[in-house]
């Protein structure tokens, strides 16, 4: 490997590092979304079992709640994307949260596989670069 090829290999290694960082950030964002969906699903389940007219605490985020009275525990408004929301039955709303969780879990699995493959490629390239640098220094 000549010096130009070595520089190209080092640039490729930097690209791998940037890609791995991006994957880690994406996985973290997806994990946050999964936690949010779990809280939403739990809130819907609890609200579904509340008696009409009973006092309830509704989570608003940041470990904060507001007091409310249960008025209709058979329906919920669920966002479907692009700022659009639909009224759904409570069962369908909970099912929607579960489906989204499954999709995000699958995304994390795929990102994890991609991360492992990139790590292996980066490790191999790093070993190659180190051995080539040692060979060039030995000349």
Image (cartoon, rainbow, N blue to C red):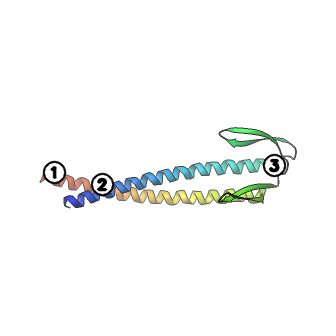
Which of the pair 85/21 is nearer the observer? 85
Question: Residue lying farthest front?
Answer: 83
Q: Report the number of numbered marks.
A: 3
Evaluate if marks 1 and 2 touch, with contact meaning CB atoms under 8 Å apart. no
- Residue at image x 71%, y 48%? 42
Q: Are marks 3 and 1 in contact (CB under 8 Å)?
A: no
User: Badge 2, how many Cα within 10 Å: few under 14, some, many 20+?
Assistant: some
Crowd around label 3: few <14 · some 14–19 · many ≥20 (10 Å) = few
Secondary structure state at the residue bearing disc 3: loop
Question: In which quarter of the view is residue 132 placed?
Answer: bottom left
Kindly identify which numbered label has been placed on residue 126: 2
The one nearer the camera, 102 or 56, is: 56
* Residue 15 appearing in the image: yes
The residue depicted at 25 percent of the width and 57 percent of the height is 7
Closest to the observer, 5 or 111: 5
Q: Which mark is residue 49?
A: 3
Q: Which residue appears at 67% of the width and 38% of the height?
A: 63
Q: Residue 124, can we see it?
A: no
- Residue topped by disc 1: 137
Q: Position of residue 88 (x, y in %)?
A: 77, 59
**85 displayed left or right of 35:** right
> Farthest right residue?
53
Q: CA distance from mark 1 to mark 2?
A: 16 Å
């Amino acid at each position: 490997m000549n010096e130009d090829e070595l520089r190209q290999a080092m640039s490729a290694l930097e690209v791998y590092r940037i890609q791995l960082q991006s994957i880690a950030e994406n996985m973290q964002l997806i994990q946050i979304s999964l936690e949010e969906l779990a809280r939403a699903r739990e809130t819907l389940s609890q609200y579904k079992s509340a008696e009409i007219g009973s006092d309830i605490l509704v989570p608003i985020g940041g470990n904060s709640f507001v007091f409310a009275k249960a008025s209709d525990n058979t329906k919920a408004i669920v966002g479907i994307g692009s700022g659009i929301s639909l009224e759904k039955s409570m069962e369908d709303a909970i099912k929607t949260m579960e489906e989204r969780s499954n999709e995000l879990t699958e995304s994390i699995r795929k990102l994890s596989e991609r991360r492992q493959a990139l790590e292996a490629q980066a490790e191999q390239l790093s070993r190659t670069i180190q051995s080539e640098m040692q060979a060039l220094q030995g000349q």
